[in-house]
Amino acid sequence: MSKAFSIRVQQSGAEFSCDADDTVLRAGLRAGVGLSYECNVGGCGTCKFDLVEGEVQTLWEEAPGLNPRDRQRGRLLGCQCVPLTDCVIKPMIVDDQFVPVDAPRRFFGELVAIRDLTHDIREFVFKDDQAADFRPGQYALLHLPGVEGPRAYSMSNIRNADGHWEFIIRKVPNGAGTAALFDLKVGDRIEIDGPYGLAFLRTDVTRTVVCIGGGSGLAPMLSIARGLVAEPGMQDVKLKFFYGARGPQDLCGEDELKALPGFGDRLEFLPALSDADAAAAGGWSGAVGFIHEQVKAQIPTDQLQECEFYTCGPPVMINAVMQMLGGELKVSPDRIHYDSFV
């Protein structure tokens, strides 16, 4: 049993216990403290804090979430610090919006099924002995053998009593995390920590839901689609599911959506291929172009203002989507949901 330290938040006075092998951010979230965060793995910088009292160890000194000015001021990242003593911290933001609905927990999940969706995208199903409680669109941290630091991957399923945590993941060339993940065999066990994430399905909203995904971004968008179908209060809500891929061999997701009630009626699958040459060579007769362009082309501007948007995919895709929706079309920021993975 690892030693635990007391962490106090200067602004609110909230106190929580943090194990010596846990990070300040995750321990706070487990305790129901609203510490600000997004990526949870050192990239975005949303969990910055000032250390007022005490001592911590930084796990990743070069984490890109801190800029040179932050480092000069001695700021730290909650997701990259473990306590060495009792501490007093001053987070950048403390707000109830960050309080988890389902408290994240650490457990060992057994890999019980593997399925290839494309030549480089694979579905992994892990099982735990407790119910899997999370919101559609959230992610978990996977601790992989031989890999330093956890990797954040979104679930593709929805909460269930069977303890199944399903992930759809694209193998990244030269990526240590996905290389280790794709080497796993059925029966292997890994540590999983979750759920996390703020880009989950808003079940109290009845506007048309627009999902925009690419690559591994299929997973949380599929979770949101499944969550919408399962939610009693959203049975009249329409879903437009945009998915972008490079060529025909990279396209997936339609079979999973077809299995949902309402497909072809209130649920639409709207794929697009970005590589015109690959599309032509593969006999593709659908839309060609970047997926954010297809959103604008297929939904009238006046209707775009009345939609709820969820997006996940490569950073370049997210940036293009955000520039179009928030910058060009002036869609209200509270209608655009994404988690920043850097």
Image (cartoon, helix red, strand yellow):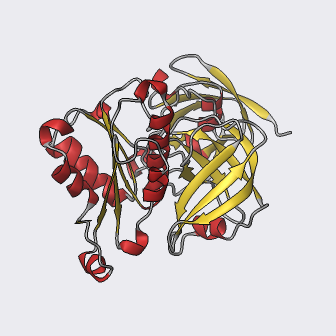
In front of the other: 308 or 115: 115
x 65%, y 63%: residue: 114
Left or right of 101: which side holds 208?
left
Check the image and name the residue furthest to the right: 1
Q: In which quarter of the image is the N terminus?
A: top right
Left or right of 282: which side holds 179?
right
Check the image and name the residue furthest to the top: 13
Q: In which quarter of the image is residue 82?
A: top right
x 47%, y 45%: residue: 260
Name the spot of residue 189 as percent of width and height, x first: 77, 56
In front of the other: 279 or 311: 279
Name the spot of residue 214 as percent of width and height, x first: 38, 59
In the picture shown, does residue 13 fall above or below 193? above
Q: Quadrant of residue 133?
A: top right
In the picture shown, does residue 163 fall above or below 282? above
Name the spot of residue 102 as percent of width and height, x first: 60, 29
x 57%, y 43%: residue: 79
In front of the other: 199 or 289: 289
In the picture shown, does residue 205 fall above or below 278? above
x 29%, y 78%: residue: 283
Residue 153 appears in view = yes
Q: Quadrant of the C terminus?
A: bottom left
Q: Quadrant of residue 238?
A: top left
In front of the other: 250 or 38: 250
Left or right of 287: which side holds 253?
right
Q: How many marks?
A: 0
Residue 74 appears in view = no
In the picture shown, does residue 25 fall above or below 279? above
